[in-house]
């Protein structure tokens, strides 16, 4: 069953907002000069993980399917990627390292490669990975609590 894109926003909106909010806090803290050991606790990854599990369980309980989870995976990934691009761009514009581009997060890659990697990854393998994880959670939820109406892809 195809759904209009707007129908995905209602269950995902608070996770999108939370990712952007935590990402904004992360940008502010790093640009204000707070140490990375503190800034790392403003973790978009944690919000993405919790949101992914929530949306997978929500989908199973509301008779949505695996295809819907794929759309949700982009709702989770795109705001994260946007914040990463802003953070990396700020590092490039200021010429100063920030938490978005440090050796432990960039694996020593140059800024342009790190930024390109986030854009490509954010549109390809990152949402696919989230989708696969959501599929496992969805499957476990259906097995534990009963069958969703349409779990076919």
Image: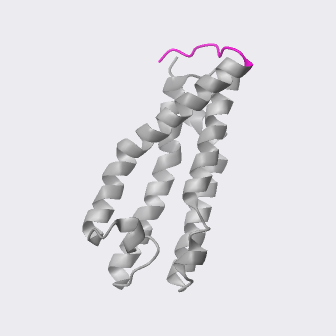
Most frequent secondary structure within the magenta stretch: loop
Q: Quadrant of residue 21?
A: bottom right
Q: Which residues are magenta?
A: 145-153
Where in the figure is residue 123, as x and y percent of width and height?
A: 36, 46
List the single residue furthest toward the right: 145
Residue at image coords 31%, 57%:
117
Where in the figure is residue 105, as x and y percent of width and height?
A: 41, 66
Q: Does 36 sit left or right of 143 as displayed?
A: left
Task: Name the foreground residue: 50 vs 8.
Answer: 50
Q: How many marks?
A: 0
Residue at image coords 34%, 80%:
93
Q: Does 45 sit left or right of 144 as displayed?
A: left
145 above or below 43? above
142 above or below 77? above
Asked whether residue 136 is drawn in magenta, I would say: no
Where in the figure is residue 68, as x and y percent of width and height?
A: 53, 28
Asked if residue 4 can be seen in this view, the reply is: no
Q: Quadrant of residue 87?
A: bottom left
Task: Name the foreground residue: 8 vs 50.
Answer: 50
36 above or below 15? below
Q: Quadrant of residue 138?
A: top right
Q: Does 97 sit left or right of 114 as displayed?
A: right
Asked if residue 80 can be seen in this view, the reply is: yes
Where in the figure is residue 40, as x and y percent of width and height?
A: 56, 69
Residue at image coords 41%, 69%:
104
51 above or below 46? above
Residue at image coords 39%, 80%:
97
Colouring chosen for the image of the structure: one colour
């Amino acid at each position: 069953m195809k759904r209009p894109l707007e129908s995905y926003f209602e269950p995902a909106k608070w996770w999108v907002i939370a990712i952007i909010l935590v990402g904004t806090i992360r940008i502010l803290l790093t640009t204000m000069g707070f140490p990375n050991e503190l800034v790392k606790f403003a973790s978009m990854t944690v919000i993405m993980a919790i949101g992914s599990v929530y949306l997978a369980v929500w989908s199973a309980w509301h008779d949505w399917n695996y295809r819907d989870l794929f759309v949700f995976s982009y709702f989770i990934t795109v705001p994260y990627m946007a914040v990463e691009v802003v953070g990396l761009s700020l590092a490039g514009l200021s010429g100063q390292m920030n938490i978005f581009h440090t050796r432990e997060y960039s694996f020593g890659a140059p800024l342009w490669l790190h930024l390109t990697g986030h854009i490509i990854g954010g549109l390809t393998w990152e949402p696919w990975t989230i989708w696969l994880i959501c599929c496992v959670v969805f499957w476990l939820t259906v097995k534990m609590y009963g069958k969703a109406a349409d779990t076919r892809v």
